[in-house]
Image (spheres, rainbow, N blue to C red):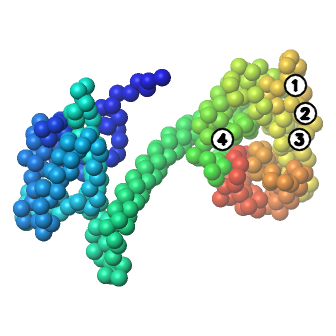
Amino acid sequence: MTADIEFTAFFDATPSPYLVLDADLVIRYVNPAFLRTTGRTPDELIGKPFFDALPENPGAHAEHAEATLRASLTRVLNSGKPDTLVLQRYDIPAPDAPDGFEERWWSEIHTPIAGPDGAVRWIVQRADDVTGFVRSQRAQEPAGELTDLEKGMAAELYVRAREVHRLNQELRQAHARERQIGVALQEAMLSAPDLELHHDDIAVRYLPAASSLNVCGDWYDVVDLPPDRYAAAVGDVVGHGLHAAAVMGMLRSALSAVIRAIPSPAQALEVLGLYARSVEGATAATAVKVLVDTRSRLIIYSNAGHPPPVLLHTDGSFELLDKATDPPLGTREHHVPRPQAGVSYQPGDTLVLYTDGLIERRGEDIDVGLARLTTALAQAGALGADRLADALLARLDVAGGSSDDIALIVVRL
């Protein structure tokens, strides 16, 4: 099978400097990397004889730079075989330099391309700038000097190391751009305007996994339902990164819309479970939804495969909201109504919803993590919602992030 490659696009994209000469040594093509390396423009090079466009520096200490380069090109034309020049000095015209030239050293490879008659029609020149390597060698002690063969190998390693460094820089820049996009996306999807109505008694925290792009599949939501109710939810989509965040955004938005029309947590999760079946990557997502009725002082909740919320009473005792737990979203083959339960509370009690990254540790039973959470709650329960959220993260040793995503809601009832 023949690859369908547009070679001009290939040379335009490659980071190595290339030019193409015809059999008369006239420059017919230069790639962007060559232009950047030499500081030339296409008009200064293309269509001109090589040694007119890039003349030899008459004042250079290196002898016969043009003759050496011309001899290499002639060998390629006559033999039809590639030729290499290692550590070849060939200065570049520089109007601002005292003598009109800038010292440059190159590692060059000349590769022939034959025409239909078998004669060399084109010469592809790859010219890697190794000036930095030569200058570093000059700074070494005489005892550290290399043989010509070693210098050639070292120059090649220098070129490759520089390419790796450039690629690493580009990867870091791409990663930074992707992270910025991810953070903006996450902030938009986690926006909860109704939180402003509860800024004194509800605190939220969001910590993506330490290895992620600051985006994840965990989420939280708070919805005000006037005149005397509000709902809170946390959820967890399997996986990390942008795809998990996109799935999270769809599930969160759907549940946030449903709870406004159907305040029942169980019915809202039923609708969300049906929706999850149509979203790729949403199956096995977990969520827990609570409805707080401030007039009757009742918490109504339903849980789809999620760790149980914790209700801390003012006397230091606590309850796990685990009486209405069902499988994760979209895992049942047929629709079954989800369970719902209620628990009363007293003013000053604290409700905590969270994702599993807060309590789970590799190789440890979940009950151990739950015990760690309830102990931390009992120790810091007198704090306000905002300070308590920070205290929980610190006491559970995840304030700086962990190997899993974390979403946390702390509600002072």
Local SS, label 3: loop
Disc on the earlier residue, 1 or 2:
2
Mark pair 3, 4: CA separation: 27 Å
Q: Amino acid at mark 1?
A: Arg
Residue sitting at x 6%, y 62%: 58
Mark pair 1, 4: CA separation: 27 Å
Local SS, label 1: loop
Disc on the earlier residue, 3 or 4:
4
Q: Residues within 10 Å of mark 1 (few under 14, many from 20)?
A: many
Q: Amino acid at mark 4?
A: His
Local SS, label 4: strand
- Label 2 or label 4, whichever lies nearer to me, is 4
Which percent across, then down, holds residue 381?
A: 81, 58
The circle drawn on residue 314 is none
- Of residue 42 and residue 195, the one placed in the foreground of this image is 42
Q: Which residue is mark 4?
A: 240
Mark pair 2, 3: CA separation: 8 Å
**Left-right relation of 118 to 286:** left
Count of marks placed on residues: 4
Tag 2–tag 4 contact (CB < 8 Å): no
Q: Which residue is mark 3?
A: 321
Q: Which residue is mark 1?
A: 338
Disc on the earlier residue, 2 or 4:
4
Tag 1–tag 2 contact (CB < 8 Å): yes
Q: Which residue is mark 2?
A: 324
